[in-house]
Image (cartoon, grey):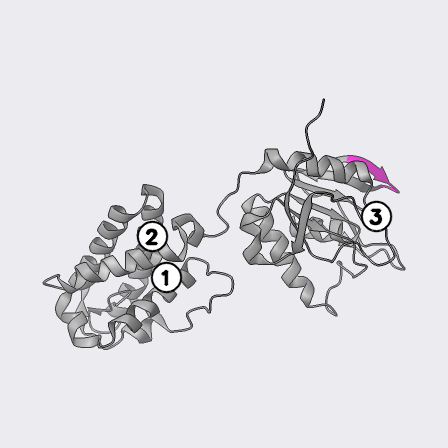
């Protein structure tokens, strides 16, 4: 005897059912509009046929947002099912060539690299899969294809981080490291006087530095990106290479004390790249260095 069908939350790039088409059987599943911030908690992503072009999107700039969404889902390991134009979008996100079919037929994707074709039509792939991506090239998805996809979702429940920010633990983890770092830096004999001389509003400063690191690590959907200029923000501090080296060491120490080893290593590596950039700029300005994150 089989158990109850799996349930969960599915995201869809188009409202279901589609006008003029029979609705797919999604009994027991909650369906929400697809948005980047919802990817992490979704069981899967649906890309229904919407009749819009995929091969040439110059008249449809909103297509780039959908492609970015699909790419984000694939990066995270979110299962994706596309049919019709949705299959072409999925193929394009996977790097396959897409050709315009003309008339009312959906644009068609070539077989992406590494994909397995399960059925062909007119010399083009009709049904193909690669990893957790499933495509059906025609405008209506057959019930067996949909049923098979939904049944596979419980086995595809693990996810990968969608960005370096998620790898380190999100905004909360970044804020914790930034706050702890500055507690230590303000008490440091070398760095403390620099911060005391240049920072007046500490809550605002901590928020700016947190925004900087969140942006550097890939950003968070719905959160405004840091728009400053790193070199300009640190110009005129008059500190030297010893300050920069101490900043890097203290940042690394703080990250290792508060985060798992892999997350700490990621933050330290990003800081090292930033420090090298600032160090190069300082060597052209008389040997001083601007302390990253100050």
Assign a secondary structure to mark 2: helix
Q: Can residue 116 be seen at all in this image of the molecule?
A: no
Q: Mark 2 touching mark 3, by CB under 8 A?
A: no
Q: Main secondary structure of the magenta part?
A: strand
Assign a secondary structure to mark 3: loop
Badge 2: residue crowd in 10 Å (few <14, some 14–19, many ≥20): many
**Is residue 249 shown left or right of residue 37?**
left
Badge 3: residue crowd in 10 Å (few <14, some 14–19, many ≥20): some
Q: CA distance from mark 3 to mark 1?
A: 44 Å
Assign a secondary structure to mark 1: helix
- Which of disc 2 and disc 1 is earlier in sequence? 1
- Which residue is identified by label 3? 140
Q: Mark 1 touching mark 2, by CB under 8 A?
A: yes
Query: Eyeballing the image, is 284 above or below 45?
Result: below
Say which quarter of the image contains residue 211.
bottom left
Badge 1: residue crowd in 10 Å (few <14, some 14–19, many ≥20): many
Q: Residue 267 bears which disc, if any?
A: 2
Report the residue that reaches farthest toward the left.
189
Residue 63 in the image: x percent, y percent?
69, 63
**Is residue 225 shown left or right of residue 270?**
right
119 drawn magenta:
yes
Residue 190 in the image: x percent, y percent?
12, 64
Q: Nearer the viewer, residue 214 or 32?
A: 32
Residue 194 in the image: x percent, y percent?
16, 71
Q: Residue 213 bears which disc, if any?
A: 1
Image quarter hosting the N terminus: top right
Query: Eyeballing the image, is 110 above or below 226?
Result: above
Q: Magenta residues, as a range? A: 118-123
């Amino acid at each position: 005897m089989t158990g109850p069908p799996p349930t969960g939350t599915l995201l869809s790039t188009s409202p279901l059912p589609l006008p003029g088409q029979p609705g797919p059987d999604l009994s027991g599943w909650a369906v929400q509009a697809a948005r980047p911030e919802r990817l992490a908690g979704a069981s899967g992503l649906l890309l229904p046929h919407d009749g819009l072009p995929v091969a040439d999107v110059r008249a449809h700039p909103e297509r780039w947002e959908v492609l970015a969404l699909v790419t984000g889902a694939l990066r995270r390991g979110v299962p994706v099912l596309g049919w019709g134009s949705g299959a072409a979008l999925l193929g394009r996100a996977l790097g396959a060539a897409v050709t315009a079919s003309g008339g009312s037929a959906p644009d068609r994707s070539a077989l992406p690299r590494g994909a397995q074709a399960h059925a062909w039509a007119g010399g083009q792939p009709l049904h193909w899969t690669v990893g957790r991506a499933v495509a059906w090239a025609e405008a209506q998805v057959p019930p067996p294809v949909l049923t098979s996809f939904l049944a596979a979702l419980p086995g595809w429940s693990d996810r990968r981080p969608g960005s370096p920010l998620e790898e380190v633990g999100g905004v909360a983890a970044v804020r914790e490291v930034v706050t702890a770092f500055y507690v230590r830096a303000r008490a440091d004999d070398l760095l403390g006087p620099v911060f005391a001389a240049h920072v007046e509003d500490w809550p605002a400063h901590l928020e700016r530095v947190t925004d900087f690191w969140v942006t550097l690590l890939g950003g968070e959907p719905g959160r405004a990106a840091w728009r400053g200029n790193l070199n300009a923000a640190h110009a005129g501090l008059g500190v030297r290479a010893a300050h920069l080296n101490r900043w890097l060491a203290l940042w690394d120490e703080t990250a290792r004390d508060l985060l798992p080893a892999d997350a700490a290593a990621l933050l330290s590596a990003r800081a090292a790249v930033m420090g090298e950039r600032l160090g190069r700029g300082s060597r052209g300005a008389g040997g001083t260095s601007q302390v990253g994150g100050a």
